[in-house]
Amino acid sequence: MIEFPKRFLWGAATSAYQVEGGNVYSDWWEWEKRANLKNQSGAACRHYDFYNQDLDLAKSLHHNCHRLSIEWSRIEPQEGKFSSEALEHYRLVILALKERGLEPIVTLHHFTNPAWFASLGAWCNKDADKYFLRYVSKVVEVLANNVRFWVTINEPNVYAYFSYLLGFWPPQEKSLIKSTRVMNTLERIHIKAYRLIRQIYKEKNLMPPKISVAQNMQAFVPCRLSLRNKLAAYLRHKSYNLGFIDKIFRHKALDFIGVNYYSPTWVELKGWGIKNFASDVCEKDHHHLKKNSMGWDIYPQGLYDVLISIKRYKLPVFILENGICTEDDALRWEFIQEHLKSVNKALLSGLEIMGFIYWSLLDNFEWDKGFSPRFGLIGIDYNTFQRTVRESAKKFAQVCLTGKL
Ligand code: BGC
């Protein structure tokens, strides 16, 4: 049996666009239509309407925290026009969490932008800071009284790479210059948002909140243990996993480190160019690991490795996402257990870990992959919107209740 600290935070995450439905003012809404995606987000899980029931389920599963995101395009559907209904909606959601004893962890940007912001060039617009901070201040003013944990940006590295370097997501740019520029903008904006949020709490005489980003971290593992593969893996870890964190840490704009971990990347260098170091992976499937339904390898050791690699910042760590999409619920439970063992091992090594948040509370809209990947502790029937609590959720609930596995 393994044991977790007494005041450990246990929960599951959602993001607004992936579960709410009807986010018609978002850049993704427009892009889904333009790109003619087979699965469009549409009503998603109708979580906007059913949040009370969903949070009842989270409570019944003994969660004591919940991570959610605020949809900027609802708060500011047109430039400079703020929706008091939307602000009120999120205020009520936060109250609903508090009433159920769920600590809210609030993300301000989770991949989506208002369509008007996108049409102005989004993060490449010279006034991006001004727009984002104005939105942040509106939200924080309303929610500060009931929120202690803020995540400014979800996975800035994934966002910059998928949207600006690899061209998978809107605005589908394939430019190293633009993706680097967006990363720099997001670093700067995080630092400014961090200071702004703290300032608002100060003016309201509230205890300082805890602020971070949710950093996507991959375990970069050399496929064959050659010196050059090891070097390439190390360099990729330094830049992809730690680059953003290093920068905001140096500016003292980080109260804890939010970690999102899913899978490993097998590094197999094919040449000596800069591009090789940045992108060569092993394409052969000889690693003999179980996989999720999108083909990502399951590698719990990787979570331990990334956790140990951030020990040197001497900051508390919070696992803000870890999860699996699968049709095999027994595999989901195995995944959770194995990853919790890695978390426990890291705790025993002396790392301060505040909590573990599973991705996701509900099956949801998995971006360009649509609705088929099933990440939820709770299954969704997209025809009837009926919720079904999975067996893995019940088993995880016992860990949340007892702190023991
Ligand atoms: C993102 C989620 C996404 C999950 C699974 C994370 O990178 O934050 O929005 O659904 O991974 O792909």
Image (cartoon, grey):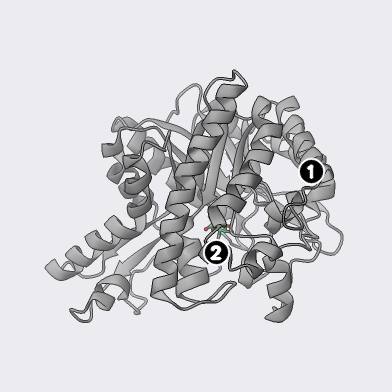
Circles 1 and 2: CB atoms closer than 8 Å:
no
Residue at the spot 36% in from the left edge and 68% down from the top edge: 288
Residue at the spot 80% in from the left edge and 45% down from the top edge: 86
Residue at the spot 61% in from the left edge and 55% down from the top edge: 329
Name the residue nearer the viewer: 39 or 226.
Answer: 39
Q: Residue farthest to the right?
A: 384
Q: Quadrant where the N terminus lies?
A: top left
Q: Which mark is residue 314?
A: none
Is 287 displayed left or right of 61 in the figure?
left
Where is residue 393 shown, x and y percent of the image?
64, 44
Name the residue nearer the viewer: 28 or 324.
Answer: 28
Q: Which mark is residue 51?
A: 1
Q: Is residue 399 visible?
A: no
SS assignment at label 1: helix
Is 21 displayed left or right of 327 in the figure?
right
Q: Which mark is residue 125?
A: 2
Q: Quadrant of ligand 1?
A: bottom right
Where is residue 159 shown, x and y percent of the image?
51, 62
Closer to viewer: mark 1 or mark 2: 2
Is 329 displayed left or right of 289 in the figure?
right
- Distance CA(mark 1)–CA(mark 2): 34 Å
Name the residue nearer the viewer: 242 or 182.
Answer: 182
Name the residue nearer the viewer: 230 or 256.
Answer: 256
